[in-house]
Image (cartoon, rainbow, N blue to C red):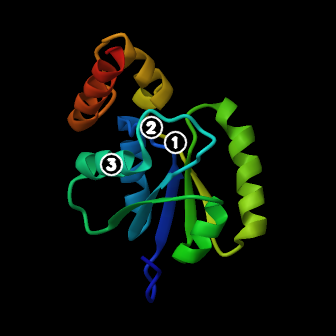
């Protein structure tokens, strides 16, 4: 989804393992600013994820429904390379806490060097999601805790199935 005319397109990269209501909050905020959003699931073979990249793409699509402004895909390699190939104006990064800032700032400066045509835009989620992370959701789900307030229904179901099959 390359930019056409005055259309502004942003890239929201991440592992999304799984997508949470915090991610969805950032997506809604990004769509208030940009015309189109590419949600790109990072496929990092060095990272041990619960869901495959294709499963994560499917979960995101199921959580977001049909919005023609959103493209969901996956990629391998550098975010900057994918951003350049996609022709985006910005890279969206979520900041939950001050502790996120140092790492994200370093990545933003590196991406600025590698892909100067795409600025990094930091967005903060609603206060109710500042503590939320995919890792915490997986930990709660692993021990059959209630996760419905943290993730969309399709993701809660997928987590239950995933951990049920891992117990066998």
- Quarter of the rendering occupied by the C terminus: top left
Q: Residues within 10 Å of mark 3 (few under 14, many from 20)?
A: many
Q: Nearer the viewer, mark 3 or mark 1?
A: 3
Q: Residue at x 31, y 32 (%)?
A: 151
Q: Secondary structure at mark 3?
A: helix
Q: Residue at x 68, y 45 (%)?
A: 104
Question: Residue extending furthest bottom?
Answer: 5
Q: Secondary structure at mark 2?
A: loop
Q: CA distance from mark 2 to mark 3?
A: 10 Å
Name the one closer to the observer, 96 or 44. 44
Give the quarter of the image for residue 117: bottom right
Q: On the picture, is 107 further left or further right than 149?
A: right
Where does residue 129 sit, x and y in percent of width and height? 43, 30
Mark closer to the chain start, 2 or 3: 2
Residue 124 tag number: 1
Q: Nearer the viewer, mark 2 or mark 1?
A: 2
Q: Are marks 2 and 1 in contact (CB under 8 Å)?
A: no
| Residue 133 visible in this rendered orientation of the protein | no
Q: Residues within 10 Å of mark 1 (few under 14, many from 20)?
A: some
In the rendered image, the vertical position of residue 140 relative to residue 154, given as above or below: above
Residue under pointer 2: 17
Q: Residue at x 35, y 36 (%)?
A: 21
Residue 60 tag number: 3
Q: Residue at x 40, y 37 (%)?
A: 18
Q: Secondary structure at mark 1?
A: loop
Residue 98 tag number: none
Mark closer to the chain start, 2 or 1: 2
Where does residue 38 sit, x and y in percent of width and height? 43, 64
Q: CA distance from mark 2 to mark 1?
A: 19 Å
| Residue 76 visible in this rendered orientation of the protein | yes
Q: On the picture, is 46 further left or further right than 166?
A: right
Q: CA distance from mark 3 to mark 1?
A: 20 Å
């Amino acid at each position: 989804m390359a930019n056409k005319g005055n259309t502004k397109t942003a890239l929201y990269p991440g592992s999304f393992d799984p997508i949470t209501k915090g991610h969805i909050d950032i997506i809604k905020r990004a769509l208030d600013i940009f015309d189109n959003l590419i949600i790109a699931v990072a496929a990092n073979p060095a990272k041990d994820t619960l869901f495959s990249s294709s499963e994560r793409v499917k979960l995101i699509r199921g959580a977001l429904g049909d919005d023609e402004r959103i493209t969901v895909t996956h990629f391998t390699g550098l975010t900057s390379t994918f951003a350049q190939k996609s022709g985006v104006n910005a890279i969206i990064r979520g900041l939950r806490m001050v502790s996120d800032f140092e790492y994200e700032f370093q990545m933003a400066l590196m991406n600025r060097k590698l892909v100067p045509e795409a600025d990094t835009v930091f967005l903060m989620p609603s206060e109710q999601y500042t503590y939320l992370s995919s890792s915490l959701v997986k930990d709660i789900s692993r021990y059959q805790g209630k996760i419905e307030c943290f993730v969309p229904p399709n993701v809660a179901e997928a987590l239950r199935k995933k951990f049920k099959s891992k117990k066998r």
